[in-house]
Image (spheres, rainbow, N blue to C red):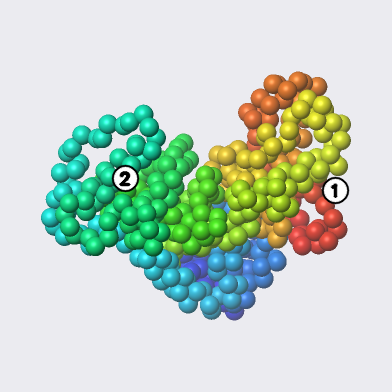
Amino acid sequence: MYFGKQNVDNDPYLGHLMSERKARASLSHKTEETIDTLLKELSHPLINLHKLRTLCFSGIPDEINGLRALIWKLLFGYLPNNRSKWEASLENNRKLYAEFVEEFLSLKKEKLPLTVLKEVEKMQEEPSIMKESNGEEVKHNEVQSYAKCIGVISMGEEKEHPLSKDTGSDWYNYYKDFNLWEEVEKDTKRTRSELDLFSQPTSKPLNKCLSRILTRSEPELHSDVLSRILFIYGKLNPGVRYVQGMNELLAPIYYCFYHDNNPAFKGYAEPDAFYCFSTLMGETKENFVKSLDNTDAGIKSRITDLNNLLKRIDQPLWTHLNNEHVHPQFYTLRWLMLLLTQEFELMDVLRLWDTLLSHPHKMDFLNYCCIALIENIRDKIIGEEFPVIMENLQKNVTAEGVEAMLKKAIALYKQYANPEEMSYIVFLC
C-alpha cells in the first residue's frame, strides 16, 4: 500500500497494520477514512505528533489490531517521531529492562546448593508456625521461618546472618525486597478481576519472581508480569516506591500492548509497558507521595483545583454539595489518582485514554471529564441529601457511558478552558 511515495507493506512496524487494513473490507466509510488518515500519518519518516494527537483525540479505531498499541507508544514518547530511530530505541530500552530484571530479581535461590534446596522442600511439608498474640513475636517468628525456608539458619551456607539488622546486609535488603514484592503482588492478583487475562498463564515459565515459597512450581501468570514491572519501578523510584492503585494505571497499558499481534512488538509487552507506565507516573507520581499531600503538587491540591472548577462552572450545584457536607475528596480522590480507570469497563478506559493521552495537558482535561461525570447526573443530586448524593456519585456517575462523558467534557473544555490551553488541540468531535 502506497502513501505518497512510501510503500510500507514490508515495513517491519507498519506492515502488520497494512495487512490488517486490507483484511477489513466491511468497515464504515467514516472508520475507513479515520484509519487511512492515521496510517498515512504513521507512514511519514517524521511523524507530526501534533497532527497525530488531533486525529486520536476523538478515538483510535479498534478494528485494526495493533493500531492503538503503536500510537500509544508514540503518544507516551516511548517511540520517537523519527521512524528511522525506532529499531535502535526499542533494542536499547528492551535490553536495559532485561538488565533491570536481572539486577533486581536474581534470587538467592538460584545460587543455593542442592542441600539447601532440599531443606526448602522439607520446610514446605512442615506445619506453619503458631502465631503469638504479641505482634513483635509474630514478626520475629515469621522472619525466622523466612530464613529457614531459604535454607540458611543451620546450614552454614552464608557468611551473613539472615536476621542481621545491618542496613548494608544483603539479607536485610533481601527481606526488604520481599516485603515490597508482597505488597505489589497483593494488588496485582486482583487487578481487573472481571477479566480473565491477569489470572491466566503466560507462555513462559515462572522466572524472576519473588515469592514466599521459592520453589513455586505453577506457571507464570500475567499478574506476575504486572508484579515484576511494578516491583522494578519501585526499586528504581524509592522516593515514590509502590502505592496501591498503580497496578490499575499499568493494567490498560499492558492489556493494550499484550494483545498487539504485530511481530515487531509481540512478546515485548512487558518492557514496552514498563517504559510507558514510567512515563505516565512521571506526570502523576505526586498523587501517590503522601508527604506531598498538603503541598501545591500533591493530590489535595488537585482535588481543590477540581472543586474550584466545579464552583466556576456550576455554582448552584457546588453550593448544594457544600451545604450537604459532601467533601470533594469523598468522590474525586479515586477519579484523579487512577485516571478514571475504576469507573469504566476496560475497553471504555482504552477509549477514554485515547483522548487523555492525545491531550498535551491531560491532567487538566481530566478535571473536565470529572466535572462532566457530575453534570451528567446533576438532576439526581441537586435536591438530595448526603446519603443519596453519595450513592449516586459512587454508583450512577458513569451510567451514560464514556462517550457521553467525553462529549460533555469537550463542550465544557471549549467553554471554560483558557485560550492558551485551547491552542494545543484541534477538536474534530
Up the image or down, 8 lies above or below 112; here it is: below
Q: Give yes or no for contact between labels 1 and 2 (Cβ–Cβ under 8 Å).
A: no
Quarter of image, res 240: bottom right
User: What residue is pinned by disc 1?
Assistant: 415
Alpha carbon of mark 1 to alpha carbon of mark 2: how far? 59 Å
**Residue 253: where, in percent of width, then height?**
52, 53
Residue ID at (24%, 62%):
159
> Can residue 262 be seen here?
no
- Say what amino acid the circle numbered 2 marks: Val
**Residue 25: where, in percent of width, then height?**
53, 54
Up the image or down, 340 lies above or below 400; here it is: below
Residue ID at (53%, 77%):
85
Which element carries disc 1, helix, strand or loop?
helix
State which mark lies toward you, 1 or 2: 2
User: What residue is pinned by disc 2?
Assistant: 143
- Say what amino acid the circle numbered 1 marks: Gln
**Residue 20: where, in percent of width, then height?**
48, 59
Quarter of image, res 125: top left
- Which of 238/110 is in front? 238
Say left or right for 161 vs 271.
Answer: left
Say left or right for 189 vs 361.
Answer: left
Residue ID at (83%, 61%):
420
> Can residue 73 be seen here?
yes
Q: Residues within 10 Å of mark 2 (few under 14, many from 20)?
A: some
Residue ID at (82%, 52%):
417
Q: Residues within 10 Å of mark 1 (few under 14, many from 20)?
A: few
- Which of 283/350 is in front? 283
Say left or right for 324 vs 141.
Answer: right
Is tag 1's residue or tag 2's residue first in the polypeptide sequence? 2
Label tally: 2
Which element carries disc 2, helix, strand or loop?
helix
